[in-house]
Amino acid sequence: MFKFINKKVILTVVIIVAVAVLVMSSLTIVEAGHTGVIVTLGKVDDTVYQEGLHFKIPFIQEVVKIDNRITKLEVSTDAFSKDLQTVETTLAINYRVDTSKSYSIYKNIGKDFETVLVVPAVNEVLKAITAQYTAEQSVTNRTLVSDGLIAGLNDKLNEIGLYITDVNIINFEFSEAYITAIEEKQVAQQQLLKAETEKQTKITNAEAEAEAIKIRAEAEAEANRIIAESITDELVNYNKIEKWNGELPRVTGGVSPILDVSSISDVGSASDSNSTDIAD
């Protein structure tokens, strides 16, 4: 009797466990941001499960989860610039999988679509974009290169169901020879700029000096003009009177013969003296 009961209990437990396993294998949960690709005995269905709890046929159907959230991919690759310089570029690419095409991507490519499809596309498009710019232009036009990568990758991948949302250029690296050439060019440009600055400084100083001389000359000319306008006949006569020592000039000249005024004065003095003697 006891053995019969034990067998019954064990059988019940086995049935319960079997049912639990069956129920659990009949349920699948699709996480947020994912889709579930339904595979029935190896055949991929054209419909997918969206987020949430779903039923599937135990041991016959499998649900493969595809991440449809934005995924970051980092790629490093070499390419040649327009001036045939080797440019090693490191990119950070954000992409996502279209939910409506999750089943076709899994069916045609598999879960490893990033390695099989995305990375080769990045390398191909990057080489095409880099060849449009010189090495120096690639650095100064990072935004144009990034935009070109986004457009080129979307043209190549959108039809499959992959969408590139953003491309960030992390780094550009060049050969040692090119870096040395750039440094020498920068040094030469700095020296040229210094020479131009010194030249402009000299020109500016010379112009300033010439302007100062011009200003002084104009000021002196203006002063002379004012002085000339202020000299009148009355002022000339006044200055002559102020400077006269009270003596008549000893010699006068003109149309008539020159006369010695002092001799006339002496004669006058002699005449006066004779008159005085006669009177006496």
Image (cartoon, rainbow, N blue to C red):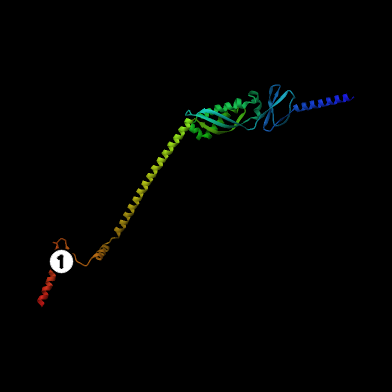
Instruction: From the top left corner, tell me how far across and down residue 196 is, in percent.
Output: 40, 41
Depth check, front residue: 234 or 12? 12
What is the secondary structure assignment of the residue under circle 1? helix
> Looking at this rendering, what residue extends furthest in the left direction?
278
> Looking at this rendering, what residue extends furthest in the front direction?
2
Q: Quadrant of the N terminus?
A: top right
Amino acid type at image mark 1: Ser
Query: Left or right: where does residue 43 sit relative to residue 227?
Result: right
Image quadrant in which you'd find residue 48: top right
Image quadrant in which you'd find residue 242: bottom left
Query: Left or right: where does residue 139 sit relative to residue 224?
Result: right
Residue depicted at 52% across the width and 32% down the height? 172
Instruction: From the top left corner, tell me how far across and down residue 264 is, in percent.
Output: 14, 67
Instruction: From the top left corner, tell me how far across and down residue 85 is, in percent.
Output: 48, 29
Which residue bears the numbered disc 1? 262
Instruction: From the top left corner, tell me how far across and down residue 230 is, in percent.
Output: 30, 60
